[in-house]
Structures are given as structure tokens and as C-alpha cells.
Amino acid sequence: QKDIEKYEKEIGKLEWAEMPEKKQSHIKLRLRDCDPMNKADWPKQHEWLYEKLQAFHTTFSQPIKQLNADEYVPEDEDQ
């Protein structure tokens, strides 16, 4: 919970889909009240996306570098 609060402080409100039975979780971030088909709004949308991608990189690059790739076990694709 402490990490989640830290990440959300740095990035913004995130949607967390934890999967305790797996070694992965999903994190979603959405820009609300926008229409991707509205070309006039694209500069605002692109600016938001750029800022959030930078925030994701800054926030998660170090924790990801600390993971041990040798511990990774791929899931069965039949599941």
C-alpha cells in the first residue's frame, strides 16, 4: 500500500488489477473526458500522454531494474 501511494503521488490516480496467483499485475491510467477522434484536442491529449509516460519511466525504472530476470518463469500458454 505504501508503494501504491508513492506511485500515485508521482503519476496520478491509477487503476490496479492485482493478480496474486500470477507474477504480474496490470496498472491502468486513463485520461477522462476526452475524445480521441477530436483532432482539435490532440495537442492536449499528446501532452498528457507524454507527461504520463515520463512519469511512468521515472517512477518504475528503478524498481524494474531491481527485479531478477533469472527468477522469471513464463506461464503456460494453455492457462
Image (spheres, rainbow, N blue to C red):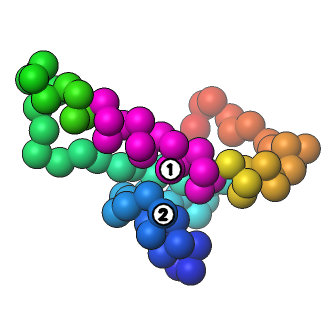
Seen from the viewer's position, the closer of residues 39 and 16 is 39
Seen from the viewer's position, the closer of residues 1 and 77 is 1
Compared with 11, 51 (above or below) is: above
- Spot the residue most to the bottom: 2
- Residue 30 lies in magenta, yes or no? no
Q: Secondary structure at mark 1?
A: helix
What secondary structure is the stretch in magenta mostly built from?
Answer: helix
Q: Residues within 10 Å of mark 1 (few under 14, many from 20)?
A: some
Residue 69's disc number? none
Q: Secondary structure at mark 2?
A: helix
In the picture of the structure, the residue carrying the numbered disc 1 is 55
Q: Residue at x 68, y 35 (%)?
A: 76
The reply, left or right, for residue 38 in relation to residue 11 is left
Q: Give percent across and percent down for residue 72.
A: 81, 44
The magenta stretch is: 46-60
Q: Residue at x 41, y 43 (%)?
A: 51
* Amino acid type of the residue tagged 1 in the rendering: Ala
Answer whether labels 1 and 2 touch (C-beta < 8 Å).
yes
Any part of residue 65 in sight: yes
* Amino acid type of the residue tagged 2 in the rendering: Glu
**Mark 1 vs mark 2, CA separation in Å:** 7 Å
Q: Residue at x 41, y 36 (%)?
A: 50
Q: Quadrant of residue 59?
A: bottom right
The reply, left or right, for residue 59 in relation to residue 61 is left
Residue 10's disc number? 2
Q: Quadrant of residue 66?
A: bottom right
Q: Residue at x 69, y 39 (%)?
A: 75
Q: Which one is earlier in the sequence, the residue at label 1 or at label 2?
A: 2
Any part of residue 16 in sight: no
Q: Give percent across and percent down for residue 12.
A: 37, 61
